[in-house]
Image: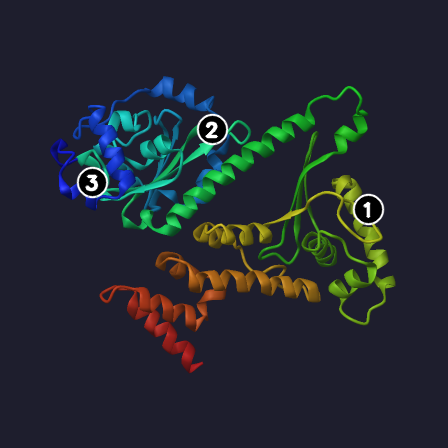
Amino acid sequence: MLAGHLDDHRLQEVRPFVRESWERSWRGRVHPEGVPPLDLFSEELESYRLAHPLASAMDMIRALLLPSESGDAGVVVAVGDQAGRLLWVEGDYKLRSLAEGMGFVAGANWSEGAVGTSAPGTALALGRSVQIRGAEHYNRLAHPWSCSAAPVRDPETQRVLGVIDITGGSEVVTPQARLLVDATARAVESELMVTRLRERNTAPRTKTPAKSRATATARAVLHVLGRDRARLETESEDRESIVELSARHAAILLMLSVHRQGLSAERLCELVYGPGVSPDTLRPEMVRLRKVLERTAPDLVPESRPYRLPVALETDAHDVLSLLDRGAHRVALTAYRGPVLPQCPSPGVEDFRETVRAALREVMLSEASLDVLLSYADIPEGQSDVEALSLALKMLPARSPKRAGLVARIERLEVE
């Protein structure tokens, strides 16, 4: 804050929203040194966060922001309440240990009023996502760190419930990192809304027959990435079920999910079997598929004339496309388990498989950060992609030890 000199001309070089946050912190008599207050202690913290609305979303937040081996994730992920008190601090063990030195621990108050300008506190103060780089922090202890944070709102009342933050080095204040944090906050809000709707739908209804309540499918997901036999997961009021589908049934359901407006018998037959095949070939398979669904997800039994699904069927492939559209490149790459039904010869499946693969590659080449591009180069689709490998080589620093390995891979592929 330049020792409190509000008329210092150097303040004009600071980003306006950061400068305004500094001024709020200074006028609020926030001290620029020292660790923030610890508002919640062990037992109190545990009971408070178990009852917090974001507790149910923690698994989703971990899945979106932390890899499976989160102990060496390279970032720290924190989730706080609407008052700026950190409730969960997880991620890279080494970074978390270092962050404890500035008081970045569960139970600590990181609101603007307690610690001055920081991503969690300023995001709550402004009601939108922000990124704070190094010395933009008001507290000097936080100067070695950078962070991105976004508030999470109640999906119905729009009241702020809390904040999601990622803390680390310069990699957490890229445009992609901000999109990722924003996308995670929106995903959490959507999940909260889905949970509420599910609870309302499962509440007793005096005029609804028990049988129809019991068979109502709340959610259906078709897993097709990297699998030859698709897995259909359904949730209803009284049960959950998982069933593996034959390749043909998987192709039919996937096509009906892709073409939600419905398909004629002739067009669905063409997508599943290829051109020149009579729709009479499709009809017995539809009968068998209906019998499978009647046992597991009655609401999902396809209607005819045209063939269409009466309720929405999500797929993990569509989830990847959605994440790519929202700029959550790292999450999309993690969610991509492999090609869509890789051994399925159905023309419609082959087209959709290529659509997903091409969308992923296009984003990797045009928008992804270096670390995401390097991760893409490690999956089967990227291992033989000379253009992706060459782009990664171009983006690497001149003295990076990874350059030699990339050069060798490119030369080997060019020889082949």
User: Does 59 appear above or below 199?
Assistant: below
Do the numbered discs 1 and 2 sit on residues whose CB atoms are within 8 Å?
no
Q: Quick check: 365 left or right of 14?
A: right
Residue farthest toward the bottom in the current orientation of the protein:
415
Q: Quadrant of residue 45?
A: top left
Q: Amino acid at mark 3?
A: His
The residue carrying mark 2 is: 55
Q: Amino acid at mark 1?
A: Lys
User: Does 9 appear above or below 324?
Assistant: above
The residue carrying mark 3 is: 143
> In what element is the residue under mark 3?
loop
Q: CA distance from mark 1 to mark 2?
A: 39 Å
- Which numbered disc, 1 or 2, marks the residue that appears first in the sequence? 2
Q: Quadrant of residue 61?
A: top left
Dot 3 alpha-carbon crowd within 10 angstroms: few under 14, some 14 to 19, many 20 or more: some
The image's mark for residue 291 is: 1
Dot 2 alpha-carbon crowd within 10 angstroms: few under 14, some 14 to 19, many 20 or more: some
Q: Residue at x 29, y 68 (%)?
A: 403
Q: Quick check: 260 left or right of 31?
A: right
Q: Can residue 306 be seen by looking at this rendering?
A: yes
> In what element is the residue under mark 2?
helix
